[in-house]
Image (spheres, rainbow, N blue to C red):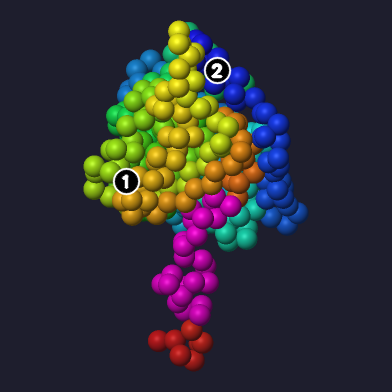
Amino acid sequence: MAFTAMLALNALAAPTDDVYLLGPDSAPHDGAPKGKVIGPLTLPSEVFPNTTRHYWIYVPAQYQPTNAACLMVFQDGHFFVAPDKDYRVPFVFDNLIYRREMPLTIGVFINPGRTPDQLEATSTNWGDGINGRATEYNELNDNYAKLIINELLPALEKDYNISKNPDDRAIGGASSGAICAFTVAWQRPDQFRKVLSTIGSFTNIRGGHAYPELIRQSERKPLRIFLQDGLNDNRGRRRNSTNTYDPKWDWHAQNRLMVTALTEKGYDVNYCWGIGTHSNKQGGAMLPEMLRWLWRDYPRPDDPQDESNRKLLVPASNQP
């Protein structure tokens, strides 16, 4: 409980976080078609028995069932989908999709699971200590990947045409939701190959501090990862009898080790270190730019590399 309280305390914005302000891409723009948000919907699970979780679906205004859409899944969905919190993903998607700075993408925002006697996540407690968040998000096995791939995706595919290409699928989150997103892509790069991590908990909550060495020891996987963290994130002081420093509990040090390991193995990785705490202020302010980088090379509708548009670019007199 003391550790959970420490995280909750640090999640409150400090003066160092107040320098990060949302930009115009995090608000509605006149002229940008507005997608719709559907939900909350409920997903039961056999992977995590006796649990359900709420999720929301963002559908771009430009979506047509005849064309497969890209997909991006966010953990701790209630916070990422909210129009008045730090990320405001539907507004960002509206603007970037309209300007063709990211592909037409269906967004999914999924909460951690809970049993009937556990509490729902809230904006002040994302689930640590009140539901199954720690188990689902922080363990390094493939259980949560199974939930996403074998249970969530089939539910989505009943109603939406989603690309099967893993390069068209991204997954992201903050804190424990960030290491969770990385674990899904790490376990199943055949399904997800883009990862967004903000204030990622690559620490010893459930052994996540092992990732840098696992990355070095493993064959490189076809992943693209953006990591964000702040210099004043939780810095390894565990609330124990000695209150001693433990590097396995130093969020910023562990994020830096992740970047070093990923870089040494030749991953497509980008990162930004700020001055913030364990807060979402910087991640929210940077979200549009991080998304531009993750999707930077998708074929635009007027891109000659996109064969479906070849005839649009060749003069009629020269077309076969």
Q: Residue drawn at (51%, 87%), measured in percent from left and top?
A: 315
Q: Which residues are magenta?
A: 289-313
Position in image of residue 317 (x %, y %): 49, 91
The residue at 33%/51% (across/down) is: 264
Labelled disc at residue 189: 1
Which one is in front, 298 or 36?
Answer: 298
**Residue displayed at 33% across by 36% down:** 211
- The quarter of the image holding the C terminus is bottom left
Q: Earlier in the sequence, mark 1 or mark 2?
A: 2
Mark 2: which amino acid? Answer: Met
Q: Amino acid at mark 1?
A: Pro
**Residue 219 rendering spot, x and y as whole percentages:** 24, 48
Query: Which image quarter: residue 187?
Result: top left
- Residue at the extreme right: 30
Residue under numbered circle 2: 6
Numbered circle sitting on residue 166: none
